[in-house]
Amino acid sequence: MSGKSQKKSNVMDETTISLFEQGSTSDTRKTYIIFGVGRGGTTMVAGVAKLCGLDIGEDLPINLEDNDFNLAVLKKKGISQPVVHIINVLAQRNQSKDIWGWKFPRAIAYLPLIREHLVNPHLILVSRDPIATATREILSGTPKMDAIELVLRLQLRNMELVKQWEAPTLIVSYERSIQRPEQFITDMCGFLGVERPVDTADIRAFMQPGEYKVI
């Protein structure tokens, strides 16, 4: 297996690249993890996935991050062993759900530790221009070079995990998806194995930068 599939003839029109996806759309049990880096476009991607029908949790905050998988929230709650907590939550979700997932930009911090507890993991890795991603750190006082290098190291670490796991993966270009929303919606639905909605107006509206809201 080559590890990748090309879905469209013109690579310049791609919003995503799929890897290791052979046969995955017919699987009856799947766990989707949406990750990337902070300020890297994961909220937009998670919103599209949710609006296309993926169960990523209930009563989610505006950033669409399930508190049971959010390290910062778990720390604030005083949970001393967050990975153990996540593993316990995985056991509960695996028992009650066949196809589901969650979004946490920095999931790479714990994904290697929970791999054996994931049922048929499917990765959705979001990639964004490192300059845009590093802006918040730069504005907070981090030297420009340090901030950009940090983003690049995190992106490389994410790609290394994709390479090691060889799990079905959708790599999403945030910039191209914003430019070609209809194509991205098609790509996302294909990866989720669901029928593409006929009316995509709500999804396209959600994708507009600055328009993310509780859904």
Image (tube, helix red, strand yellow):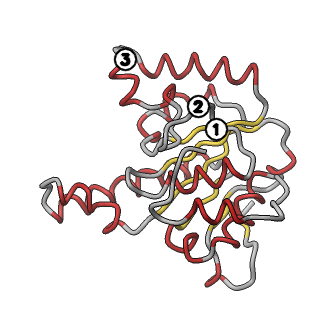
In the picture, the quarter occupied by the N terminus is bottom right
Q: How far apart are the alpha carbons under marks 1 and 2? A: 10 Å
Residue beneath disc 1: 56
Residue toward you, 39 or 98: 39
The image quadrant of residue 48 is: bottom right
Q: Tell me which residue sits at (64%, 82%) in the image.
A: 13
Q: Mark 1 or mark 2, which is nearer to you?
A: 2
Residue beneath disc 2: 59
Q: Earlier in the sequence, mark 3 or mark 1?
A: 1
Q: Do the residues labelled 3 and 2 touch (CB within 8 Å)?
A: no
Q: Name the spot of residue 162 as percent of width and height, x first.
A: 55, 51
Q: How far apart are the alpha carbons under marks 3 and 2? A: 18 Å
The amino acid on which the numbered mark 2 sits, given as a three-letter code, is Asp
Is residue 94 left or right of 33 when viewed as pictured?
right
Q: How far apart are the alpha carbons under marks 3 and 1? A: 21 Å
**What element does badge 1 sit on?**
loop
Residue toward you, 90 or 203: 203
**What element does badge 2 sit on?**
loop
Q: Tag 1: Cα neighbours inside 10 Å, few (<14), some, or many (≥20)?
A: many
Q: Tell me which residue sits at (65%, 18%) in the image.
A: 91
Q: Name the spot of residue 23 as percent of width and height, x first.
A: 83, 52
Q: Name the spot of residue 214 as percent of width and height, x first.
A: 55, 44
Residue toward you, 77 or 36: 77
Q: Is residue 19 above or below residue 77?
A: below
Q: Name the spot of residue 78 as percent of width and height, x first.
A: 34, 14
Q: Tag 2: Cα neighbours inside 10 Å, few (<14), some, or many (≥20)?
A: few
Q: Mark 3 or mark 2, which is nearer to you?
A: 2
Residue beneath disc 3: 77
